[in-house]
Image (tube, grey):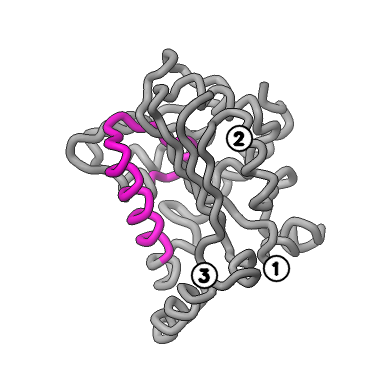
């Protein structure tokens, strides 16, 4: 079961963030942040299309930014979050194919084998402990179901400092928030799914000025394929399928 202190910390943080930022965080409002979002939409939509996923669960939907990015005719989305304030914002989006629910991620209110896919952007690293959530995701996914997530990469220097230096953490993070190393999160996921892929992704920082985005994107695309250097990317792209 989820840790009660962790639940309260996360709920308080995101309720306050909803009031502070409203529809999106600062990093999603910049020109570079918008480019990052579109890249994530494209990758998740491609994965959902390849999987033929029509019934989709999104955990940690927040204000519904990703939800709107993956909303398409023929898809049905159940979007869950812990924060009532964020869900209040999300419900204002004109998405007739989406049902918004407040729920804990390890107590999903769905029958077994309900979904073709589960998705999320920057949510798993907020959850302590993680294993009960993975077990419940496995339960509600169909045997052919798949998962697609983006999570922060602990090997990235900025993310490492934000998590490990206390005064920096207090500026940007919740008390329990963490990040993942590629090998360790892959090993944890392999306890539940046979096929797991965790790849470093995205060197584009939201603060990059608009005139430099093209150059930064070109350089970042090269770095994503450079052995060693690619491990420092800002995010991890996580995919899994085929339940044990």
Question: With respect to residue 27, does 92 lie above or below?
Answer: above
CB-based contact (under 8 Å), mark 2 and mark 1:
no
The residue located at (65%, 69%) in the rendering is 228
Judging from the image, what secondary structure is the residue with disc 1 in?
Answer: helix
Give x and y (percent) for residue 123. 55, 43
Mark 3 lies on residue: 225
- Tell me how far mark 3 sits from mark 1, CA to CA: 18 Å
Give x and y (percent) for residue 174. 69, 48
Disc with the residue nearer the chain's start (3 vs 1): 1
Mark 1 lies on residue: 157
- Tell me how far mark 2 sits from mark 1, CA to CA: 26 Å
Give x and y (percent) for residue 136. 54, 22
Where are the magenta residues, as a range?
36-64
Residue 187 appears in which quarter of the rendering? top right
CB-based contact (under 8 Å), mark 2 and mark 3:
no
The residue located at (27%, 32%) in the rendering is 54
Specify the label residue 190 is tagged with.
Answer: 2
Judging from the image, what secondary structure is the residue with disc 3 in?
Answer: loop
Which of label 3 and label 1 is nearer to you? 3
The residue located at (37%, 25%) in the rendering is 115
Disc with the residue nearer the chain's start (2 vs 1): 1
**Apparent side of residue 77 relative to residue 109 in the rendered image (left or right):** left
> For this rendering, which residue is in front, 92 or 79?
79
**Can residue 152 be seen here?**
yes
What number of labels is visible? Answer: 3
CB-based contact (under 8 Å), mark 3 and mark 1:
no
Image quadrant occupied by the N terminus: top right
Mark 3 crowd level (few <14, some 14–19, many ≥20, 10 Å Cα): few
Disc with the residue nearer the chain's start (2 vs 3): 2
């Amino acid at each position: 079961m989820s840790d009660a202190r962790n639940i309260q910390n996360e709920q308080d943080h995101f309720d306050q963030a909803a009031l502070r930022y409203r529809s999106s965080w600062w990093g999603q409002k910049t020109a570079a942040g918008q480019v990052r979002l579109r890249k994530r939409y494209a990758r998740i939509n491609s994965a959902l299309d390849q999987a033929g996923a029509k019934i989709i669960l999104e955990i940690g939907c927040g204000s519904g930014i990703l939800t709107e990015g993956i909303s398409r005719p023929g898809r049905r989305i159940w979007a869950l979050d812990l924060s009532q304030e964020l869900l209040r914002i999300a419900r204002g989006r004109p998405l007739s194919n989406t049902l918004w629910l407040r729920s804990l991620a390890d107590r999903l209110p769905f029958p077994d084998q309900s979904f073709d896919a589960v998705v999320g952007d920057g949510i798993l690293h907020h959850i302590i402990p993680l294993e009960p959530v993975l077990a419940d995701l496995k339960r509600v996914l169909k045997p052919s179901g798949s998962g697609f997530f983006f999570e922060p990469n602990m090997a990235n220097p900025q993310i490492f400092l934000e998590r490990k230096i206390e005064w920096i953490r207090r500026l940007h993070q919740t008390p329990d928030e963490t990040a993942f190393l590629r090998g360790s999160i892959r090993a944890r996921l392999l306890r539940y799914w046979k096929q797991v892929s965790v790849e470093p992704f995205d060197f584009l920082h939201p603060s990059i000025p608009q005139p430099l985005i093209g150059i930064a994107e070109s350089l970042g695309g090269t770095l994503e394929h450079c052995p060693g250097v690619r491990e420092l990317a800002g995010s991890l792209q996580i995919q899994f399928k085929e339940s044990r």
